[in-house]
Image (cartoon, rainbow, N blue to C red):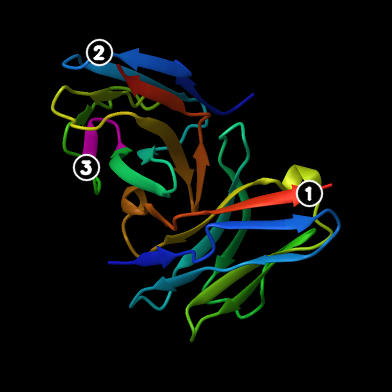
């Protein structure tokens, strides 16, 4: 089945640690996105990538980094510079005008 | 910059009733896409319906329909014959297709939590 997978589903991090969230898609989409969701709010764009080896900052990129070495993969690293990282993170890929979302990763900082 | 506003944080209706969720947006663009996404307790984002601004006809998908008022910048979602499985967060979203492909991000509203009661 084609789709987007994110792992892990739940992630716990101690303060001061970097952590990497995985996002993989087998839909053959060029564009991929990372969004953050906080309680009572909509999704906000962290980073996006139009094509392999290219990525751009979104609206709330501070404290995050990404890479795009393969078309299928777009991992997100939450660094210790992110002041409030506890949130739900959603990855998406895009075909034409529609974005398809993964199941998300819940990150909690202890 | 585009903004999307959903003024109803929560709504609750009885099963089989009809419910309308409100959404307004602000943009200077003439052509754009509008979407309603559903996020059930599983937290998976599911596309419910899409409207292209250049189309005057309102989009319909089975029990889901929209009332798109371009001049008023309003995009409401109507759910007919509501079912228990419709219980979810609903997000209105905007996309500007004039940007290059990868930059076509979604701009989301704050969401409306809809509960369908038996």
Percent x, y for residue B81?
A: 84, 59
Q: Nearer the viewer, residue B81 or B102?
A: B81
- Give the magenta part as a residue range: A51-56
Of callouts 3 and 2, which one flags the residue occurring earlier in the amino acid sequence?
2
Count residues near mark 2 (Cα–Cα under 10 Å), then give few for <14, some for 14-19, many for 20+: few
Same chain for the residues at labels 3 and 2, yes or no?
Answer: yes
Q: Nearer the viewer, residue A82 or A72?
A: A82
Numbered badge on residue B117: 1
Res. A14 mark: 2
**Is the residue A91 above or below the residue B78 in the image?**
above
Task: Give me the residue at 33% from left, 78% from top.
Answer: B28
- Is B43 colored magenta in this rendering? no
Secondary structure under the numbered disc 1 in the rendered image: strand
Any mark on residue A56, and which?
3
Residue at 48 percent across and 19 percent down: it is A9
Query: Disc 1: which chain?
Result: B
Q: Residue at x 36, y 74 (%)?
A: B27
Q: Secondary structure at mark 3?
A: strand
Quadrant assignment for the N terminus of chain A? top right
């Amino acid at each position: 089945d084609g789709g987007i997978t994110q792992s892990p589903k739940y992630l716990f991090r101690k303060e001061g640690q970097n952590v990497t969230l995985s996002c993989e898609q087998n839909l053959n989409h060029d564009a991929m996105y990372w969004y953050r969701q906080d309680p009572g709010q909509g999704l906000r764009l962290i980073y996006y990538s139009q094509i392999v080896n290219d990525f751009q900052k979104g609206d709330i990129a501070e404290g995050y980094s990404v890479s795009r070495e393969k078309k299928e993969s777009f991992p997100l690293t939450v660094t210790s510079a992110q002041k409030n990282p506890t949130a739900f993170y959603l990855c998406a890929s895009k075909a034409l005008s529609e974005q398809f979302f993964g199941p998300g990763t819940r990150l909690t900082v202890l | 910059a585009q903004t999307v506003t959903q003024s109803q944080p929560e709504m609750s209706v009885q099963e089989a009733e009809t419910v309308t969720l409100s959404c307004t947006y602000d943009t200077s663009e003439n052509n754009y896409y509008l979407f309603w996404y559903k996020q059930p307790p599983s937290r998976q984002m599911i596309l419910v319906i899409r409207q292209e601004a250049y189309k005057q006809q309102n989009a319909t998908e089975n029990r889901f329909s929209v009332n798109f008022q371009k001049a008023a910048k309003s995009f409401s979602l109507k759910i007919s014959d509501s079912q228990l499985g419709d219980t979810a967060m609903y997000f209105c979203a905007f996309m500007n297709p004039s940007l290059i492909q990868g930059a076509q991000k979604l701009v989301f509203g704050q969401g409306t939590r809809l509960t369908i009661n038996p």
